[in-house]
Amino acid sequence: MNAEIINFYSENDFELQDKELYENWLKKVIASEGKKTGEISFIFCNDEYLLEINKKYLDHDTYTDIISFDNTLGKILQGDIFISTDRVAENAKTFDVNFDEELKRVMVHGILHFAGYKDKTEEEKSLMRQREEEKMKMFHVEQ
């Protein structure tokens, strides 16, 4: 039985606006990869919260914008995606984009990992970036 649920939780004071818009977009992104939506949870948090997860589960003592725990089964994408809104805001400044654009990039990045994309090598990073750009354009399509 396929749940087809995308949850948005907040462990800080960030509140995602237009949740339905994001949910519809992410489901379209997943379908565009020939996959199905299972249960996916986005957890928005601050740097310290994500740093603790990074140390505890990945043994990395560094700040990061996203950590995803992939529970995908076959073509059904599911899992938890933790996003530091502090990092997203910082990166938005660094890359000279607005917060919402950077947030979409990070969110779709997590989904693309679940769909099987990697970003360890330069080649993989380049493909991941291409896919992020492609999928972000889908957000602007009439809902």
Image: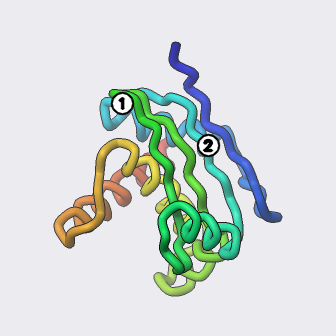
Question: Residue 65 location in percent, x, y?
Answer: 54, 70
Residue 40 visible in the snapshot: yes
Q: Which secondary structure lies at badge 2? A: strand
Mark closest to the chain's N terminus, 1 or 2: 1
Can you tell which quarter of the image residue 49 is in?
A: bottom right
Task: List the single residue furthest toward the top.
Answer: 1
In the displayed structure, would residue 84 be above or below residue 135?
Answer: below
Please name the residue that numbered disc 1 is placed on: 35
Can you tell which quarter of the image residue 19 is in?
A: top right
Question: Residue 129 location in percent, x, y?
Answer: 31, 64
Residue 8 is left or right of residue 90, and the answer is: right
Residue at 30% x, 45% y: name it: 116
State how far apart marks 1 and 2 are (Cα): 17 Å
Q: Which numbered disc, 1 or 2, marks the residue closer to the eye?
A: 2
User: Is 105 or 45 nearer to us in this picture?
Assistant: 45
Number of other residues with Cα within 10 Å of mark 1, as a class: few under 14, some 14 to 19, many 20 or more: some
Residue 41: image tag: 2
Number of other residues with Cα within 10 Å of mark 2, as a class: few under 14, some 14 to 19, many 20 or more: some
The three-letter code of the residue at mark 1 reads: Lys
In the displayed structure, would residue 31 be above or below residue 93?
Answer: above
